Amino acid sequence: MKTRGKTFVHETIFKCRIYLIFSVVAFPCLYLNLAICQEIGAYRTVGSGNFGNISIWQIYDGASWSAATLKPCQANDIYIEPTHLLTLYGNEEVKSLFINSDSGADQKLNLNSYNLDIYGSLQAFNGYAPGVPTGSHPSTDWIGNSISSTLTFKGVSRVIIPDGAWSAQSTNSRYAVIFDPGEGIELICQRAFKALKFTIRSGTVNQKINITSNPNVCATFSFNTNSSLGTDEFGDFIIENGAKLITQCSSDILYRSGTSTSSRPASLFNLQAGAELILLGSSPQIEAASLQLNGKVTFLKNVGTQTFLSKSYSSSAIPIFFHTLEIHGSQNVNLPPAISVSGNMVQVGSGSFITNTTHLTLTGNHEQLISGFSMKPLDLTVDKTGSSVILQEDLTVSRNLTMLRGKVDFQGKKLIINTSNSGTYAYSGGSWEKVSTVTFENTPSALNASNASFPFGDRYQGGIRKVQFLGEHVGGDLSINYTEYKGADSNPGFNDNDINNTPILYRLYSYFQFSGLASSSNALELRISADNLIVDKPEDLRLVCAGYAAPGSHIESSDTINLWAIRKLTFDEAIGKNFTVGSFRTLSILPVTWLSLTAKVREYRAQIIWSVAQEKANEKFEIYRATDPLENWTKIGEILGKGDSEIPVAYKFMDESIAQLSTSYYQIRQVDYSGKWAWSRVVRLENELINPTDQLSIFPNPYTFGKISVIEPKSFNLEKTQVTIFSMQGFLISTFTFNEVGFSEKLEILNPGLYLITFSNAERSFQTKWIKRY
């Protein structure tokens, strides 16, 4: 328990090197009027010198100071007295560190490129120990001497920079600060703190604001302002994975210089992946020339208002690129005009992200969850290189929606575009998964491949069922409803309405419905893509309805990339119809949907097991093996498929010739009746048949033909080993002394069956099962 400012104290003190533990009872401070005292076991310097030099130290016994017999350690407060300079010649540790800050104190602590662990607080004082708590006075080199010199705060939750006992006035703080108390521990800073670098390695650092002063004063993290380090931005603040910064401040969270005439930002604010920044201030600002916000930024304010994270210095970076954003408080947070997010946006509290004036870009290769609120951005750009954006509410884009790449999973919710009647929709790539309805309000009159391509993901067949309307129309709000069903009808029983009355032999069960455009006699092209379906020729495709011919006339496609089914019709003709992809030749969905593929050792063979969700026109599976997955794949067998199946089917294959003491890779090639194929993923099998350090085995097992061998542990001598062969019913068949040729001959003449074979000598005994097939 810290005793400065307290009347009674108690403390457990142990001496570091001899681990002597003893207790002391509470006692009154000597100067009750000042409420100041040393703890029993506190140290003070009696001269300058090496931290480890016992002769520079005195220790307090509760009444007086006497010569120390050990150097200070984790249990001891230390006081650096006026005119003294304490120097480290190795890593050290103390409880609290008290440094004299009288005017002209100059350098008081030379860390000398070593580290000092602090388990209590860091404080300044005037006079002689215990002195009077005070902020640090201006000095040129109060604590030194380089960025490799570190103060590391460890220990339990506590105040580490007390109010009224520290400041950041020193202009040349030549050391770095590390906060590393461990998970679940909170360190509190009540006063400004200046250094070359700050790192939160673990636990939580709580940056307080002094609300008793006017104006309020933030416990700023500031950086060395000495001109030898340049006159521009300087200083890094890093929050590592698992660590957390809570700040109550709005302005002055960190900077290099806070004067009104020479405000300069820090060099870097780095919120690493897995780290968290919790903002409690009304208008939080971070002044850094470079921002790396790869962790979670949380807004937590329950009174007043709270604005989004910003900056005020002209040379500070604008906070635009974020990973995860969360609201835990009750106050709404207005997003800035432009922001890019690569992780989750989550509302936990009652406050919401207000996005109606924001151009929001969803990017990166992480899965993104938008949860707890209905997102209504002014503009939205989806530019994801991998994974999906997952929405839990409807998405309404007031103005511009741009799809560059990536998936948006609507989980059955709706998409509404251009409610402002002043925006555009532009499609380059990507897909919309599980979207129920898309409404394009104030649809442009000229429809083309960019502003009228609607990419619906097919959850059952895979691929993108892209819908296009091309041509001129007279306006309205285009609405597209997508209903998904599994599978396809391979005998729909109707003909197209062309001159040849062409019979339709195939159609998908999933279908689209269109509404909302104004009545018009203008002819449009309606297109739906057959992506990820097996199509012999694009001209075989037909746009049909669910069980009957589509209105309008068929347009033959030659596009082998998009695989369009195309119809020319008026929008009036499309209303009330259910459109889908069909074909006048046999068309198959992707023949198999892979569920799993595994390889395991079973009875001294490699067992390859795979399963598929369904099959369509599937002829066979070919099994391939390699010892190097990048080359030399060898076909080792094949199994006929079920042909057609709407239910999951499992297959297995036994590799009889698995190599000893090696790693094998397996891959399955599925082949359909038309000769097209699809590959499974690759699986790796670590051969565990033989572990020469602890087991014996017979190879091959099971046995079909060839020489029979024994592979034994290095510590087992087969030359003096007795071999005994039993049937599985326990009958003795043969016993003999092992030799390589005789062993193989005796096993080769056995009848097919399962045998129990024992190998025994004076040191060890092994028993193993062996199968003879023929």
Image (tube, rainbow, N blue to C red):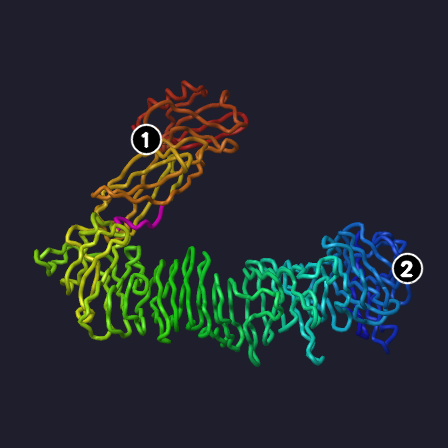
Name the secondary structure under disc 2. Answer: loop
- Which residue lies at the image location 56% right of the left edge and 70% below the top edge? 309
Which image quarter is the C terminus in?
top left
Asked which quadrant contains residue 105, the reply is bottom right
Residue 672's spot in the image, x, y percent?
A: 23, 44
User: In x, y percent, where is residue 11?
Assistant: 79, 65
Boundaries of the magenta span: 590-597
Q: In the image, what residue occupies the spot 20% across and 59% down? A: 566
Report the residue marked by disc 2: 46
The residue labelled by disc 1 is 753
Q: CA distance from mark 2 to mark 1?
A: 90 Å
The answer to whether 577 appears left or right of 440 in the picture is left
Q: Residue at x 70, y 68 (%)?
A: 262
Q: Amino acid at mark 2?
A: Val
* Residue placed most toward the observer, 111 or 569: 569
Q: Quadrant of the N terminus?
A: bottom right
Q: Is residue 182 visible?
A: no
Q: Position of residue 703 (x, y in %)?
A: 34, 28
User: Is the magenta region chiefly helix, strand or loop?
Assistant: strand
